[in-house]
Amino acid sequence: MSSPPPAWVLLPAAREAAAQQRYGALLRLARTAAGLTLAQAGQLAGYSAATLSRLERSVQPLTDVRVLRRLASVLAIPPNMFGLADTPPTPSTRKAPQATTLADQGDAGQGGPVRRRQFLGVATAVAATPLRNAADPSGHDPGRLLVARLENVVHQPSSAPAAMPVDRVREGMIAAKADFQASRYRRLAERLPALLATATADAGTDPAVLAELYNTATHVLIKLEVSGSGWLTAERALTAARASGDPAVIANVTRNAATLYRRAGRYDLAEHLALDAAEQLPIARSNATVEHLSLYGMLLCNAAYSAARAGDRSRAHELLDHANQTADRLGADRNAYWTAFGPINVISYRISAAHALGDAGTAIAHAARVPPGAIRIPERLSRYWIDVARAYHQWGQPARCYQALLGAERHAPEEVRSRPAVRTLAVELLSTPRQTGMTSLREFATRVGVAG
């Protein structure tokens, strides 16, 4: 089966560049979305940074089929976007490793092993050459550092991790959740991998705690678009959650599993998983817990976004209206079970759904309904501003898109400077003919890892 396309392929700018045969622009989009500098991408493809720069800027035409195929293979660019026919793998192509993960269930293995192979090949080169960041004198991208350490634990677990009392592991898990919601990637890189190693090796670890540790790792990998390893951590989280027997833990873990399926293009299955987990929560009673109501509402939002990505407008609105009814039962935004769920959070999902449905104006109208200061969790506030930036980009308003990205950076700098989605938008803004209202755009682009 073919792998799902990278997220940047779905951008209008990517489709337009392909249609207009502006292959240099496509190359730059793919490289920056992968978080690679010109030197890193050139090393993978076998070209100098200068050559790659000339190709991206169309100073040197991209017409050689062999060069196009090589670049498409290295940077996971769908061949048809370069005007190439899809061809079967050659005998020299490495076979994907076999593994039992969530991607193998329900005929959802679309690209799971292939995507893992592609990512790990790139990640090795990336880890060897840290990204330089103007606001980061240490030369380390916090997201890349976090991913590298998580993958070391997930793929090469330590045979003798440091022992830790059970209560300390639980406290560490709660602290890791707080770090994630505060978008403190450096601190999370110091805390989460060590906790994962210890909790995995200790047979006495509470499975609910183990599930939430792996679930946090999955959430990080989803945000940073590391889908290969994300499938593995999601599988481990779900296994531990089922062992705990707690429907709340299972529901929380299922949210990320559904997200992975959605990113693989399995929208129906993603919606089904989220709604099935929601139905297991006892929320019908008048004394339903805040935790269960919050998880139920978040799962409805998750399912609604999957419906929106599938283009099912009426279904998305129906599910979001249902989620809003659940939020009304809570009365206010809370952070029960690390959900940040409430009426404002439902509006945030309406923004995401409207953008997915191509309704940029509607997305901005929803965003205007969020009062200043209403979103207090940095990770959620960053998502809000990035979604607003996406909507303005979709609407053809680059200056406002840029201002929204600056808003996200003010509240969650480590996350914004680590996310491929932000790099993709930065590349698009840099290619805007007139950059009125975008003072210091190049400095911002450098901070988020767009070089060259």
Image (tube, rainbow, N blue to C red):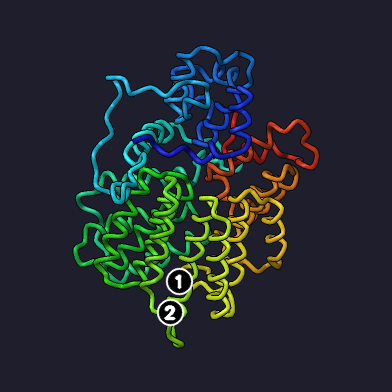
Question: x and y percent of residue 79 in the render?
Answer: 47, 25
Q: Is residue 153 visible?
A: no
Q: Position of residue 321 (x, y in %)?
A: 57, 69
Instruction: Provide residue 373's location: percent of width, then percent of height.
Output: 67, 67
**Dot 2 alpha-carbon crowd within 10 angstroms: few under 14, some 14 to 19, many 20 or more:** some
**Dot 1 and dot 2 residues touching (CB under 8 Å):** yes
Tell me which residue sits at (52%, 60%) in the image. 304
Identify which residue is drawn at 33% across, 52% down. 233
Specify whether 42 is left or right of 162.
Answer: right
Count of labels in the image: 2
- As rendered, which of 359 and 302 lies closer to the eye? 359
Which quarter of the rendering shows the N terminus? top left
Viewer-side residue, 278 vs 158: 278
In the rendered view, tell whether residue 107 sits above or below residue 174: above
**Left or right: 245 with respect to 7?**
left
Amino acid type indicated by mark 1: Tyr
Q: Which residue is mark 2?
A: 283
Give the CA distance from mark 1 to mark 2.
8 Å
Mark 1 Cα shell of 10 Å, populated few (<14), some (14-19), many (≥20): many
Residue 84 in sight: yes
Disc nearer the start of the sequence (1/2): 2
Q: Quadrant of residue 116?
A: top left
- Image position, residue 288 (x, y; %): 44, 83
Q: Which mark is residue 224?
A: none
- Residue at 50% x, 17% y is 48
Within the image, what quadrant is residue 4 found in?
Answer: top left
Q: Kindly identify which residue carries mark 1.
A: 296
Q: Quadrant of residue 345?
A: bottom right
Q: Nearer the viewer, residue 152 or 343?
A: 343
Of helix, strand and loop, which one carries label 1? helix
Q: Residue furthest bottom?
A: 286
